[in-house]
Amino acid sequence: MQKNQLESEIEKLLEQYRHVPFVHNGRTLEGLDCLGFVVHFYQNFGIFLPDNDGKEIDKHWYKTDPHRYIRSIRKLNSIQVSLDDLQPLDLVYFAIAKDIITHTGIMINHREFAHMSPKRNFMISKMERHWKARCRGAVRFISFN
């Protein structure tokens, strides 16, 4: 699949998320959190990620286990990529507060990513100042050249 064709396919798929509300631990189109969005979206490309690590995900999980998310990301069958080499479908992850990784999204082109926000629901954001400063890494499941 060509990069432009891929970006077009991603744009079409994102339409189904436009009015989905943020719901903590949400895993369906009736409500998703950021992990639920990533898990649900990647299924469209035949990538099946775990939607938990076997333990309940309470609302303040990061206070008792701040390294939980990055531990789970490192267990995935993926390739670490630099922020200068981002491409569509790369998973990006962020530290929102206190340098603890608690948020994730999917690159939809080389400069924007899709994600779920507790305050604004589904969003597309630019990987610029605010987000770039909070981004702690990216992984790739599919490589398109």
Image: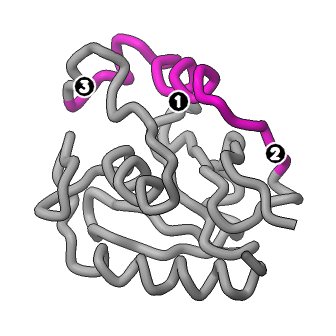
Where is mark 3, residue-wise? 57
Which residue is painted at 63% across and 61% down in the image?
Answer: 89
Q: Position of residue 105 (x, y in %)?
A: 51, 56
With respect to residue 117, does 79 lie above or below? above
With respect to residue 116, does 47 lie above or below? above
Which residue is painted at 66% across and 55% down in the image?
Answer: 90
Where is mark 1, residue-wise? 100
Which of the labelled discs sits on residue 80, or is there none?
Answer: none
Q: Position of residue 117 (x, y in %)?
A: 34, 60
Q: Earlier in the sequence, mark 1 or mark 3?
A: 3
Q: Of circles 1 and 3, which is in front? A: 3
Q: Label 1 is placed on what type of residue?
A: Ile
Quarter of image, res 51: top left
Q: Position of residue 140 (x, y in %)?
A: 71, 47
Q: Position of residue 103 (x, y in %)?
A: 46, 45
Q: Label 3 is placed on what type of residue?
A: Ile
SS class of the residue under badge 3?
loop
Where is mark 2, residue-wise? 81
Magenta region, residue range: 59-82
Along the line of sight, which residue is nearer the eye, 1 or 32?
Answer: 1
SS class of the residue under badge 1?
strand
Distance in Å between CA atoms under marks 1 and 3? 15 Å
Q: In the figure, is residue 91 to the left or right of 120?
A: right
Q: Label 2 is placed on what type of residue?
A: Val
Distance in Å between CA atoms under marks 2 and 3? 27 Å
Q: Earlier in the sequence, mark 1 or mark 2?
A: 2
- Badge 2 density bin: few <14, some 14–19, many ≥20, Cα 10 Å: some
